[in-house]
Amino acid sequence: MSSVDDPVPPSADRAPSCGAAADLQAAPLGRASVYVDRYDPSLLCPLPRGPKRAEIGIGGTLPFTGADLWTAFELSWLNERGKPQVAIAHFVIPAETPNLIESKSFKLYLNSFHQTRFADVEAVRERLRADLSQALWRGSEQRGSVGVRLLLPAEWGAQRVQTLPGLSLDRLDVECTYYQPAPQLLRADATQPPVEEVLTSDLLKSNCLVTGQPDWGSVQIAYSGHPIDQAGLLRYLVSFRQHQEFHEQCVERIFMDIWTRCRPVRLSVYARYTRRGGLDINPWRTSHPQPLPTNARLARQ
């Protein structure tokens, strides 16, 4: 990465940086920001996952594995001759990272590539991987890496739009009266033999933890075990409608509520949220090892 221009020096009018895992008061979300267009990794703001996990009964040992699948649609940089380059970026962030990246800081960081020269696309990919890995594991003795894939314009034609496979819960005509998470709506019929089901809904909505702005999503729930009451499950998913929490935290809450209330043998929860600021976030949590889900866009994305 020898051709990367020097990062901009700190100044009073630029976006606030997060030099270590910070709380939300230090994050740029919901605050006016100056958009820095020269490479600056200090713009990344890692936030610890632990406090929100503790709220839903998760201690030191995670009851799931998984990843957060991010897509960035507004990535651009300059080549060595100063010509702009563009790409779509896919990121795979392991669920075991001690931190998540606050989304606006991620956008500001990506914007800092706009007027920065890189030798080639591989130099960009490696810089993204190194910076994100450092931020996500910051403050931890453990270290790991992040998956980064850059799709150049010649590859865009192969990208497809899909729907989440499974039986849609939205077909059910149910009365909904809860608009804050209501895990008491969840139940499984232990008198019935075990089943394997994949259930989906496009009615997931929550609100940003900081700004209160709506976050729209679709969710897929795959499980094996005693049959879960589908009407109750749909009403439970709708109950997130006025709840304020980040995407990753909502999916982990859904996973834990189903896991503890319905006691399936196996469970995975996958949500795909519509993009904001050129980024979409798609958390996936599973009780058992399995391949990553396909990171393909939904129609609303």
Image (cartoon, rainbow, N blue to C red):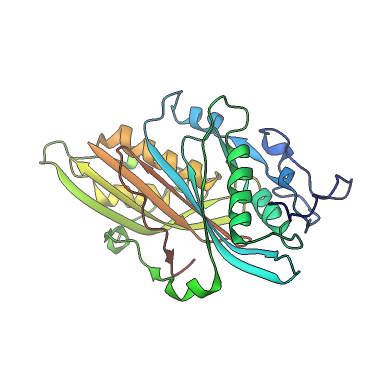
- Residue at position x 71%, y 54% in the image: 108
- Is residue 186 at least partly visible in the picture? yes
**Which of the two residues, 259 or 7, is positioned nearer the viewer here?**
7
Task: Answer with left or right where residue 13 lies relative to residue 149.
Answer: right
- Count the numbered circles shown: 0
Residue at 63% from the left image edge and 64% from the top image edge: 74
Q: Is residue 211 visible in the rendered structure shown here?
A: no
User: For the view shown, which residue lies furthest in the right direction?
Assistant: 12
The image shows residue 293 at horizontal and vertical percentages of 36, 53
Seen from the viewer's position, the closer of residues 73 and 230 is 73
Is 260 placed above or below 76 here?
above
Which residue is at 30% across, 44% downward?
A: 290
Horizontal side of 149 relative to 45 (left or right) equals left
Q: In the depicted view, which residue is nearer to us: 47 or 255?
A: 47
- Residue 295 in the image, given as x and y percentages of width and height: 42, 58
Give coordinates of residue 29: x percent, y percent: 69, 48
Foreground residue among 55 and 93: 93
With 181 as the anchor, is 21 left or right in this view? right
**Location of residue 114 (image quadrant):** bottom right
Q: Please state the horizontal and vertical placement of residue 111, each as a whole percent of the image.
A: 71, 58
